[in-house]
Amino acid sequence: MTNPSFRAAISVTALAALAACGGAGVPVSTPAPLPDTSRLSIAEIQSVQRQIAPAYNAVGITPKQQVPTSGGSSYLGYVTGDLTVPGRRTDVAGLMQMGVNFGTDRIGGTAGNFVTSDGAPIDGVLTLSNGRLDGGVNRSQVTIRSDVDGTLYTGAGETVRVDGVMTNGGFKGSTGKFIGAPMYGDITVRNGGTTQNGTFGLTGILARE
């Protein structure tokens, strides 16, 4: 079970919204956008980070033989990173959820509730699709791989199309208690008739629910 204080930090509405995007251990195919009532502020997301990060950083990578081979688990946590176009970098934070089916080696999830470092909300959801657990990349651990796609909408009227991947996600702690989910790729930012191409880099840190 996740630390009760961690669950409280996310809040009941945000937890319900994230859980609704994917059941326990069931990969997400068509997640619903996070409702406005569930939005957490940058300070509240940082509170979630403080609940998870110390325990995540204190444990080692889960050995391959300790990763479950049946059943499923749901993971909840936070995501941080940036969206970058020429001449401008926007630091963001948000919430993330992931469902893992250990029996079929499939994963799915969403990242949303994005907020800039200045506190401005960014609407939209990123979806993990075609996700899988890959035991062939590394002899000693299981790698989590997935496509990462979606469209985000800023308060400045920009539409941000995200096209990326997660190629080196993985488990940490006893029997995969935590997940590290580094994601990266390309973005296309449109504002009226103007288009800019750029990149994104995000890292999700999640704990088993």
Image (spheres, rainbow, N blue to C red):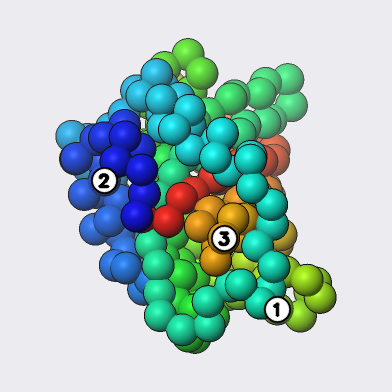
**Marks 3 and 1, the one that precedes in the sequence:** 1
Q: Badge 1 local density, few (<14 within 10 Å), some, or many (20+)?
A: some
The residue pinned by badge 3 equals 174
Whether residue 26 is visible to the viewer of this picture, yes or no, is: yes
Q: Badge 3 local density, few (<14 within 10 Å), some, or many (20+)?
A: some
Whether residue 130 is visible to the viewer of this picture, yes or no, is: no
The CA distance from mark 3 to mark 2 is: 24 Å
Q: Is residue 133 above or below residue 176?
A: below
Q: Residue at x 55, y 66 (%)?
A: 175
Q: Badge 2 local density, few (<14 within 10 Å), some, or many (20+)?
A: some
Q: Residue at x 53, y 53 (%)?
A: 178
Query: Foreground mark, 3 or 2?
Result: 3
For mark 1, give the secondary structure: loop
Q: Camera-side residue: 180 or 56?
A: 56
The residue pinned by badge 1 equals 135
Q: Is residue 167 above or below residue 106?
A: above
Looking at the picture, how far across and down is residue 120, in whole percent? 41, 19
The CA distance from mark 3 to mark 1 is: 17 Å
Disc number placed over residue 54 in the picture, else none: none
Q: Residue at x 49, y 49 (%)?
A: 206
**Marks 3 and 2, the one that precedes in the sequence:** 2
Q: Camera-side residue: 167 or 140?
A: 140
Looking at the picture, how far across and down is residue 72, in whole percent? 40, 74
Disc number placed over residue 15 in the picture, else none: 2
